[in-house]
Image: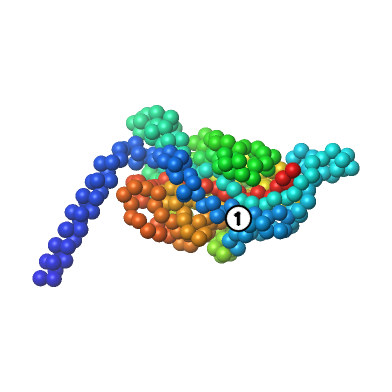
């Protein structure tokens, strides 16, 4: 009798879940499943979903004006000081510079500087409207004509159409995005990396020949030294540092708890959860942008008059991430350093017809509805306001 009752409950629950699934599926067409839209979030929900507490602490020199969470202080090796003199984007270095230069105070704060998308479908741009936006024109062609004309890999977790050892693959898009500039807060154009203060598409990995292909890339000649199990052992230490603060810059080949940076490809050839794979791919592309001169150092003494070229490795303590799709990170600490374990950050789903409540970041993936990821990239600014 008990077995019959158990079977009855299973069948009843199956019917309920099937009805719920049908309701959700009827509200979403094939194009929305292939490429979600972030128009609702980027627009109306900007003020409510953004982790504004991540701006803090705000400091002038070594004096804290507005305190913040203790983990928000980067691993500063030297202080930029409080008083500054700048000649354009460089520090005053000669008597003439000190006569004709601009004087000011070194302010330190965090601000959103980039939006980063990690997507399965090539040429899918959720922040530009997804399947409903301009790029939606290309999706029917891509879906019907095959990937060979666009990209040789069908992306996502357990990607298809590639050898089994290369079974995770994502494309990455970087946008410049400065909401504090839109709100006219803490504005100093010379402080921004690349001097970008508007909303623009900066990078799309679909244009990168090496991103979806194996082989040597000119910007990573040291790959033979660090893409091996021996170098990967040190990344457990970087994971520990990232779980309690920021990862260490001298462990530049490590991505915290997400694994190793090398090789810098869109493929991940070992098993991780989808959320960790997505963030690892993000860190790989961020490293590539530093290495190719497209990102800059904005903390430390040398960067106080403007973004400083740093074509070596990612400055880990310069960045924090806030996932905004499919989960919005929320809570007392609603951002996380690069490489922190997803089990240590939590949020609420940014999707309709999903469970309510707090969930660890490891559960951020929602089958079908939420398998693409969008992040705010927060950058530490230490700049001379003059």
Of residue 193 and residue 164, the one placed in the foreground of this image is 193
Q: Residues within 10 Å of mark 1 (few under 14, many from 20)?
A: many
Q: Is residue 138 above or below residue 340?
A: above
Residue 269 position in % (x across, y down): 47, 51
Of residue 322 and residue 252, the one placed in the foreground of this image is 322
Residue 109 position in % (x across, y down): 64, 51
Instruction: Name the residue tied to disc 1.
Output: 56
Q: Determine the residue positioned at 37% across, 48% down.
A: 351
Residue 31 position in % (x across, y down): 34, 36
**Which quadrant is the N terminus positioned in?**
bottom left
Is 137 positioned to the left or the right of 386 in the image? left
Does the rendering let one see residue 258?
no
Q: Determine the residue positioned at 53% across, 56% down.
A: 336
Does the rendering let one see residue 330?
yes
Q: Is residue 59 above or below residue 144?
A: below
Q: Quadrant of residue 149?
A: top left
Q: Is residue 378 above or below residue 97?
A: below
What colouring does the structure picture have?
rainbow
Residue 201 position in % (x across, y down): 53, 35
Is 59 positioned to the left or the right of 112 in the image? right
**Which quadrant is the C terminus positioned in?**
top right
Q: Determine the residue positioned at 78% across, 48% down.
A: 84
Quick one: SS at disc 1?
Answer: loop
Q: Determine the residue positioned at 31% across, 49% down.
A: 353
């Amino acid at each position: 009798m008990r077995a019959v009752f158990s079977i009855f409950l299973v069948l009843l629950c199956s019917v309920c879940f099937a009805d719920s699934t049908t309701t959700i599926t009827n509200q979403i067409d094939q194009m929305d499943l292939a490429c979600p839209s972030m128009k609702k979030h980027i627009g109306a929900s900007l003020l409510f979903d953004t982790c504004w507490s991540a701006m803090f602490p705000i400091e002038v020199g070594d004096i804290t004006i507005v305190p913040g969470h203790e983990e928000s202080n980067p691993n500063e090796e030297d202080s930029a000081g409080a008083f500054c003199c700048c000649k354009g984007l460089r520090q005053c270095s000669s008597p003439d510079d000190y006569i004709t230069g601009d004087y000011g105070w070194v302010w330190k704060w965090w601000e959103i500087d980039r939006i980063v998308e990690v997507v399965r479908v090539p040429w899918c741009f959720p922040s530009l409207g997804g399947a409903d936006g301009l790029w939606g024109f290309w999706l029917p062609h891509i879906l019907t004509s095959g990937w060979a004309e666009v990209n040789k890999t069908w992306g996502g977790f357990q990607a298809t159409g590639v050898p089994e050892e290369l079974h995770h693959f994502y494309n990455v898009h970087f946008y410049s995005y400065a909401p504090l500039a839109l709100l006219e807060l803490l504005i100093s154009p010379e402080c921004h990396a690349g001097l970008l203060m508007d909303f623009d598409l900066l990078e799309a990995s679909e244009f990168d020949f090496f991103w979806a292909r194996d082989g040597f890339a000119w910007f990573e000649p040291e790959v033979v030294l660090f893409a091996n199990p021996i170098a990967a052992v040190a990344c457990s230490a970087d994971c520990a540092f990232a779980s309690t603060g920021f990862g260490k810059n001298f462990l530049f080949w490590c991505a915290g708890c997400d694994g190793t940076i090398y090789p810098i490809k869109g493929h991940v050839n070992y098993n991780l959860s989808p959320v960790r794979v997505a963030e690892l791919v993000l860190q790989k592309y961020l490293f590539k942008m530093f290495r190719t001169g497209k990102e800059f150092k904005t903390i430390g003494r040398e960067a106080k008059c403007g973004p400083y070229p740093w074509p070596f490795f990612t400055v880990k303590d310069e960045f924090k991430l806030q996932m905004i799709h499919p989960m919005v990170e929320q809570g007392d600490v609603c951002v996380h350093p690069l490489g922190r374990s997803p089990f240590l950050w939590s949020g609420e789903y940014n999707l309709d017809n999903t469970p309510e409540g707090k969930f660890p970041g490891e559960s951020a993936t929602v089958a079908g509805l939420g398998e693409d990821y969008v992040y705010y990239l927060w950058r530490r600014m230490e700049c001379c306001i003059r």
